[in-house]
Image: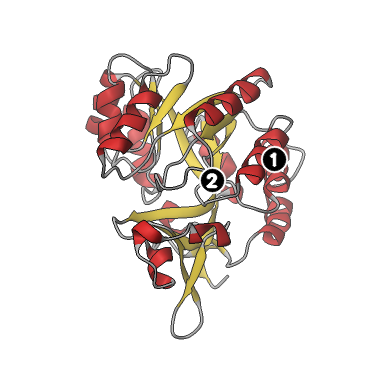
């Protein structure tokens, strides 16, 4: 089973992005997804910068994938998408159907987690268009996962988000700008102040969601470290770890050692507790509410 690193979902300073990928060269991961998937206004890096990083990581032995925007609203965004789709060097993760259309039958692509792939018919449809891998939508539980694995086309790889805040929704409005009484078009890049997103709490002061520009994420961190054996049994090919501004490489090391049998899942879970803020979740995998944390006896537990 391979480990992938998802694209950076929050907005980081340019220097921090380069530092992250410099360190990723020696990290125990196999696949790197690169690019902006949330907001086209986040232009700290141009496409040529991402291509330079891609070449750097490829030279270090990583499989590199260029990721596309999830919500496109302007002709300029379509033009940028076309540049990515027409690159002849790296595979592309399609995060909306316009990307699928541009990539179909001319470029092997990955059907990203934001595309609604919920049944075998859809999976086969993407395979016929040229998809080589699909990323499981976060709310798809293990029972349906098992059915889809049995029906997936020969050669199609499956990837699951195993660690990171869950992407829940996208909107044309920018939540982070609105929280600071700024219009979306004059946001002054306020997202830079929140490298791991802006937390939203209930009236009872409990963490509820993370606001990331136009994206809503879970406050809890999805953590499937205790389920790696089950993922192997389901013939999952890739597990994805989502970048965060701190401790990412410690997290990647824990997953690698656990996969390699050098660390027991219980010890790995205990170690990972040091690298989360608002608790863990895995409820969707069990067919429960996504924010739930299911303990070893499969009973919901307060984290």
Task: Name the image quarter holding residue 115.
Answer: top left
**Quadrant location of the N terminus in the rendered image:** top right
**Where is residue 207 shown, x and y percent of the image?**
51, 73
Helix or strand or loop: what does disc 2 sit on?
A: strand
**Where is residue 173 shown, x and y percent of the image?**
31, 60
**Where is residue 187 shown, x and y percent of the image?**
42, 61
Relative vertical location of residue 36 with respect to residue 294 in this rendering, above or below: above
Q: How many marks?
A: 2
Q: Mark 1 points at which residue?
A: 19
Task: Name the image quarter holding residue 181.
Answer: bottom left
**Where is residue 73 shown, x and y percent of the image?**
26, 45
Task: Name the image quarter holding residue 72.
Answer: top left
Front position in the image: 219 or 288: 219
Relative vertical location of residue 158 with respect to residue 276 in this rendering, above or below: above
Which residue does the image show at 71% across and 44% down from the upper left?
249
Which residue does the image show at 70% across and 29% down from the upper left?
25
Helix or strand or loop: what does disc 1 sit on?
A: helix
Which residue does the image show at 57% across and 29% down from the upper left?
31
Q: Is residue 26 visible?
A: yes
Q: Name the residue under label 2.
A: 162
Q: Which of marks 1 and 2 is nearer the N terminus?
A: 1
Front position in the image: 66 or 48: 48
């Amino acid at each position: 089973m391979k480990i992938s690193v998802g694209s950076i979902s929050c907005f980081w300073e340019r220097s921090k992005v380069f530092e992250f990928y410099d360190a990723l060269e020696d990290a125990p991961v196999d696949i790197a997804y690169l690019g902006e998937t949330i907001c086209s206004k986040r232009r700290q890096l141009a496409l040529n910068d991402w291509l330079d990083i891609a070449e750097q990581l490829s030279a270090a032995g990583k499989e590199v994938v260029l990721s596309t925007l999830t919500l496109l609203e302007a002709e300029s965004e379509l033009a940028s998408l076309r540049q990515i789709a027409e690159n002849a060097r790296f595979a592309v993760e399609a995060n909306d159907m316009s990307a699928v259309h541009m990539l179909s039958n001319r470029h092997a692509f990955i059907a990203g987690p934001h595309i609604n792939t919920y049944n075998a018919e859809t999976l086969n449809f993407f395979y016929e268009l040229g998809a080589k891998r699909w990323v499981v939508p976060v709310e798809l539980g293990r029972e349906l996962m098992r059915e889809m694995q049995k029906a997936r086309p020969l050669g199609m790889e499956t990837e699951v988000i195993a660690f990171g805040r869950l992407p829940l929704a996208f909107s044309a409005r920018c939540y982070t700008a609105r929280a600071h009484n700024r219009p979306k078009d004059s946001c002054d890049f306020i997202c830079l102040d929140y490298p791991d997103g802006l937390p939203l709490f209930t009236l009872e002061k409990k963490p509820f969601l993370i606001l990331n520009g136009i994206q809503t994420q879970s406050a809890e961190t999805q953590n499937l470290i205790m389920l790696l054996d089950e993922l192997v049994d389901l013939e999952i090919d890739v597990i994805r770890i989502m970048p965060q501004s701190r401790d990412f490489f410690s997290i990647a090391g824990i997953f690698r050692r656990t996969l390699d049998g050098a660390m027991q899942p219980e010890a790995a879970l205990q170690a990972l507790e040091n690298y989360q803020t608002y608790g863990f979740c895995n409820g969707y995998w069990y067919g429960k509410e996504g924010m739930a944390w299911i303990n070893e006896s499969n009973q919901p537990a307060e984290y």
